[in-house]
Image: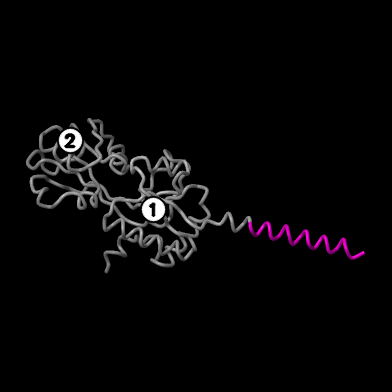
Amino acid sequence: MKQPTFYKTLLFSLLLAGYCMSANAQKTSSLTFNKPKQTKQAQHIISKLERAYANLGVEVKLIDYIHKNSLQAANLGILDGQLARIGCLQDKYPNLRHSNFPIYELSLLLITRKNSCHNCTVNELQSVSYFAGYPFAKAFMNEMNYTGKTVAANSIAPQLAMLKQHQIDGVLVIDYLLEHEISKQALTQFEIKKVSTKAIYHYLHKSHEPLLRKLDQELIKLYGTASTTLYNEHHSH
């Protein structure tokens, strides 16, 4: 007469074990992102994110991937997200969610030929080249309602060569990319001014949204309030 109770208990135990195994299988143990350029800023961001994710039991994996295609790959779930991007991308990439915690701060620079115009704005230029694969420059031109000619490029050196040869009137580039690729001596013939500054955020595919909220909490625990960027924390040392 006790057998039905025994079998019920056994069945419950098996179902519970199966549920636990399923839950563990679904738990995120690693996330894959495209490997960024080897700059000190990128290394700083990676080290901070790796520390926060490690506290959540998640390994960060970096793979080689064409940078200009990486946002679309993240939106499709081929990559798990993006290490760091500006915070106005969800209209174009609706499957991506960004952290509430700003993880860095970028400046956009406008480069023109010396003496071509003094302290000019982008709207005074007939043609501008920007770095393909980085939405900051295009977002800035949209904000400024720029209507001139735009030229996408994959490297700063050819952009500066076009500028020097009067093929374009200006170059928009992110500060750390310029610092990484071009020596200060090579820039003496140009005028450089900061035209915009934006916070950047960590992105995950929407399937990882619960983890993103945990990451926000961990970043705040490690580095301060959500209004404190890792950039400022880095430069305070």
In this view, the residue in front, 88 or 44, is 44
Q: Secondary structure at mark 1?
A: strand
- Establish if 101 lies above or below 112: below
Locate residue 2, reporting x and y percent. Answer: 89, 65
Q: Which quarter of the figure has residue 73?
A: top left
Q: Residue at x 15, y 41 (%)?
A: 160
Read off the residue under disc 1. 62
Left/right of residue 1 with respect to residue 115 in the rendered view: right
Scheme of colours in the image: one colour
Q: Residue at x 47, y 62 (%)?
A: 217
Q: Which residues are magenta?
A: 1-21
Q: Secondary structure at mark 2?
A: helix
Foreground mark, 1 or 2?
Answer: 1
Cα separation, mark 1 vs mark 2, equals: 41 Å
- Establish if 191 lies above or below 169: below
Read off the residue under disc 2. 124
Locate residue 120, reporting x and y percent. Answer: 15, 41
Disc 2 residue crowd, few under 14, some 14–19, many 20+, Cα 10 Å: few
Magenta: predominant secondary structure element?
A: helix
Image quarter of the N terminus = bottom right
Image quarter of the C terminus = bottom left
Residue kind at label 2, given as amino acid type: Glu
Q: Specify whether residue 16 is painted magenta.
A: yes
